Image (spheres, rainbow, N blue to C red):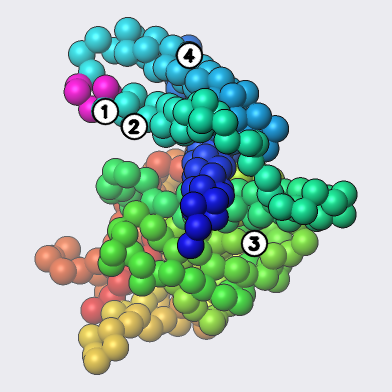
């Protein structure tokens, strides 16, 4: 292999490294939620990631015209990224040594690539060429291919970073049932998974929750009008072939919001469609129009080779509230459902409830305001 070919390969390797680093920086910026209502330091750190990515991309592609211009553009990363990070440092004078390591790792790639273009320019190396034959057709094809490649890398990077779980542990209970949106980014629909990927990667990289491609079978709210009926489910997903009830969140980042990405969580009410009868009833019916609604399941947990719960239709449920005590009976799906009750405090228990350890067939008191939904799962022995 001659020296000219080696130099060409090295040029393209450095160019590709700069482009890839810039794409990754833009993807990180694209999935982060804008810090509305936060202090200046949050905005500086948020915008510094985008500036870092844009300067790396601009500086890398500038090598196609001039190595010196590429080196100078990449040097812009020092004030563009370094100054905001130093301002953040002033605002947090007690931050640890990790801050300086972060600053070094942030500025090292553009400085190293800038030095390469500057030194190679001083040695008289010509500008980098995507194609060796300078015909117009080849140049147009090379530009089109490079643009497509960068867009593809950016899309895959956004999907990857959207699939990362939070870097902190989440300790939460299952969200209560709802009949209307409970948060701005919430999306609710039913779906069928077509393809799931990389769930097993969690053993090697625990923060990566994998992703799945799913078709939307019924919309309730939250999905944008332009969505074609296909979504990417990220984080806590499973390779399930059964229909699903999805309670997730749209990507709120500037770039992430352009993709049909729905983030799952262990805290939401997503489940198999056959286990979501209560959720389906509530989102179909909407919030209670008068008073409050109490709805829940009666079931028994079966310990076997495959532990599972089985519904208990015909179970008598005792509900005590402001209007006194009355009974309800679970239907064929093992669901008790009472509407039009006055607001107030309620306790719910099965007729067979005994106040002893291990009996989970009671709950409450629950304070319910006008238009609220209460209830619980009564697990009988």
Pointers 3 and 2 in contact (C-beta within 8 Å): no
Q: How crowded is mark 1: few (under 14 residues within 10 Å), some or many (20 or more)?
A: few
Pointers 4 and 1 in contact (C-beta within 8 Å): no
Q: Which secondary structure, mark 2?
A: helix
Name the residue nearer the viewer: 319 or 243.
243
Q: In this figure, which residue is indicated by the disc labeled 3?
A: 231
Q: Residues within 10 Å of mark 3 (few under 14, many from 20)?
A: some
Q: In this figure, which residue is indicated by the disc labeled 2?
A: 105
With 138 as the anchor, is 54 left or right in this view?
left
Q: How crowded is mark 2: few (under 14 residues within 10 Å), some or many (20 or more)?
A: few
- Label at residue 26: none
**Residue 302 place in picture, x, y as percent:** 27, 85
Residue visible at 54% across and 55% down in the picture: 5
Q: Which secondary structure, mark 3?
A: strand
- Furthest-front residue in view? 2
With 316 as the anchor, is 148 left or right in this view?
right
- Label at residue 101: 1
Q: Which of the 4 quarters of the picture holds residue 22?
A: top right
Q: Which of marks 4 and 1 is nearer the N terminus?
A: 4
- Label at residue 79: 4
Residue 147 can be seen in this image: yes
Name the residue nearer the viewer: 147 or 64.
64
How far apart in space, not on screen, are marks 2 and 4 (Cα)? 15 Å
Pointers 1 and 3 in contact (C-beta within 8 Å): no
Q: Is the magenta stretch mostly helix, strand or loop?
A: helix
């Amino acid at each position: 292999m001659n020296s000219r070919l080696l130099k060409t390969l090295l040029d393209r390797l450095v160019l590709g490294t700069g482009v890839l680093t810039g794409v990754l920086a833009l993807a990180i910026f694209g999935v982060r939620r804008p810090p509305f209502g936060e202090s200046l330091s949050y905005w500086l750190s948020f915008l510094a990631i985008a500036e870092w990515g844009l300067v790396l991309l601009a500086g890398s592609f500038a090598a196609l015209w001039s190595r010196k211009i590429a080196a100078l553009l990449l040097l812009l990363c020092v004030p563009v990224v370094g100054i905001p990070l130093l301002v953040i440092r002033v605002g947090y004078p007690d931050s640890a040594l990790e801050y300086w390591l972060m600053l070094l790792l942030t500025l090292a790639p553009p400085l190293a690539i800038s030095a390469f273009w500057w030194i190679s320019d001083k040695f008289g190396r010509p500008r980098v060429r995507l194609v060796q034959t300078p015909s117009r057709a080849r140049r147009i094809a090379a530009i089109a291919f490079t643009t497509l490649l960068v867009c593809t890398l950016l899309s895959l990077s956004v999907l990857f970073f959207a699939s990362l779980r939070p870097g902190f542990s989440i300790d939460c209970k299952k969200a209560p049932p709802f009949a209307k949106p409970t948060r701005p980014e919430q999306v609710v629909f039913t779906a069928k998974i077509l393809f799931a990927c990389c769930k097993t990667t969690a053993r090697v990289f625990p923060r990566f929750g994998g992703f799945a491609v799913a078709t939307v079978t019924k919309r309730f709210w939250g999905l944008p009008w332009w969505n074609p009926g296909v979504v990417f489910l990220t984080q806590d997903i499973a390779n399930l072939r059964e229909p699903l009830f999805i309670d997730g969140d749209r990507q709120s980042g500037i770039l992430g919001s352009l993709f049909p990405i729905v983030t799952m969580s262990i805290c939401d009410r997503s489940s198999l469609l056959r286990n979501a009868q209560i959720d389906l009833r509530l989102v179909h019916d909407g919030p209670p129009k008068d008073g409050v609604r109490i709805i829940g399941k009666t079931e028994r947990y079966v310990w076997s080779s495959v532990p599972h719960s089985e519904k208990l239709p015909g179970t008598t449920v005792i509900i005590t509230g402001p209007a006194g005590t009355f009974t309800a009976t679970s239907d064929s799906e093992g669901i008790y459902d009472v509407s039009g009750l006055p607001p107030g405090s309620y306790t719910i228990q099965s007729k067979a409830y005994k106040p002893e350890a291990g009996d989970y067939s009671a709950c409450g008191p629950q304070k319910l305001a006008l238009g609220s939904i209460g209830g619980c799962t009564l697990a009988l022995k």
